[in-house]
Amino acid sequence: MRLLIALILILCTSPLTFAATGKTITYSVGGASYEGYLTSPAPQAPLVILIHDWDGLNDYEMQRADMLFKLGYNVFAADLFGAGIRPTSIDERKKLTGELYQNREKMRSLLLAAVNTARDNGVKSTKAVAAGYCFGGAAVLEMARSGADLQGFVSFHGGLTTPAGQDYSKVNGKILVLHGTADESVSMNDFSTLAQEMEKSHVPHEMITYSGAPHAFTVFGSERYREDADKKSWRRFTEFLEETVR
């Protein structure tokens, strides 16, 4: 009986148990429709912009948004692909992300639109941090390089390569990079090169790697998920938010 009760408690408190607390927001960018997800505990609470992985905005980002909502943050999980576009095949995902990697101005306009959409829907705070996962982490660094007026930028196991012709000279906020040392998609050479680039541009930054953590180590329920690295990176993220926008 004790074992059964313990199992029930684990299931009820597991991150895999998800009940949405926010709402879907439809918005327009460049004449196309997009669907984001907004959670808002209070208009004056600091804002977190969340950017999805290459499979599009889904329950994972919505769950993370709800976790931040419970900590008292306004969160807008943005959509960079378009309303109803949630790719399931590798080829589809490569195509959609590739188009944005090739059109950095469009990527930047979508990222800026996310901030504006949150504020158009009741978020009053001028304090904001952007955070993203995998592809979203790369997008957040693009946002930082654009000179976006945010207090912080956070990449979870994101792409770290700087495109030709870009640098970090326009960054306005602090950067936090949370990376897996065992990541075979984004190398430790990429990690160290980024550190040198940011140091050269005098960007306030912090970069952490987690031993044994592969690419996408925070994704609940996947074979790549590493609980220790996930919990440690989430704790550092929430501390960073406290330090940056509270």
Image (tube, grey):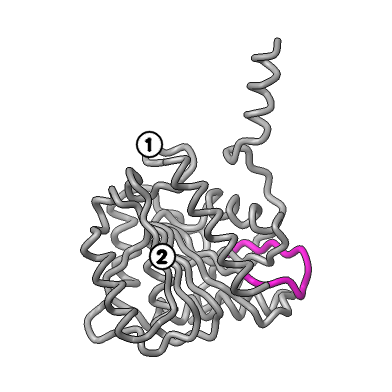
Q: Magenta residues, as a range?
A: 36-47
**Image quadrant where residue 12 sits:** top right
The answer to whether residue 151 is magenta is no
Front residue of 21 and 185:
185
Mark 2 neighbour class, 10 Å CA radius: few under 14, some 14 to 19, many 20 or more: many
Q: Considering the image in quadrants, where does the C terminus appear?
A: bottom right
**Image quadrant where residue 25 sits:** bottom right
Where does residue 195 sit, x and y in percent of width and height?
31, 72
In this view of the protein, can residue 140 be seen by the observer? yes
Front residue of 119 and 92:
119
The structure residue drawn at horizontal position 77% and vertical position 73%, both measured from the top left corner, is: 43
Q: Could you say which disc has been placed on residue 177 in the image?
A: 2
Where does residue 89 sit, x and y in percent of width and height?
33, 48
Q: Is mark 1 on a helix, strand or loop?
A: loop
Q: In this view, does 177 lie above or below 205?
A: above
Q: Nearer the viewer, mark 1 or mark 2?
A: 2
Q: Which residue lies furthest to the top in this view?
A: 1
The structure residue drawn at horizontal position 70% and vertical position 10%, both measured from the top left corner, is: 1
The answer to whether residue 42 is magenta is yes
Mark 1 neighbour class, 10 Å CA radius: few under 14, some 14 to 19, many 20 or more: few
3D distance between C-alphas at marks 1 and 2: 22 Å
Pointer 1 residue: 223
Where does residue 191 sit, x and y in percent of width and height?
28, 65
In this view of the protein, can residue 136 be seen by the observer? no
Please name the amino acid that badge 1 sits on.
Glu
Relative to residue 148, is residue 241 drawn left or right?
Answer: right
Please name the amino acid that badge 2 sits on.
Val
Q: What element carries label 2?
A: strand
The structure residue drawn at horizontal position 49% and vertical position 42%, both measured from the top left corner, is: 220
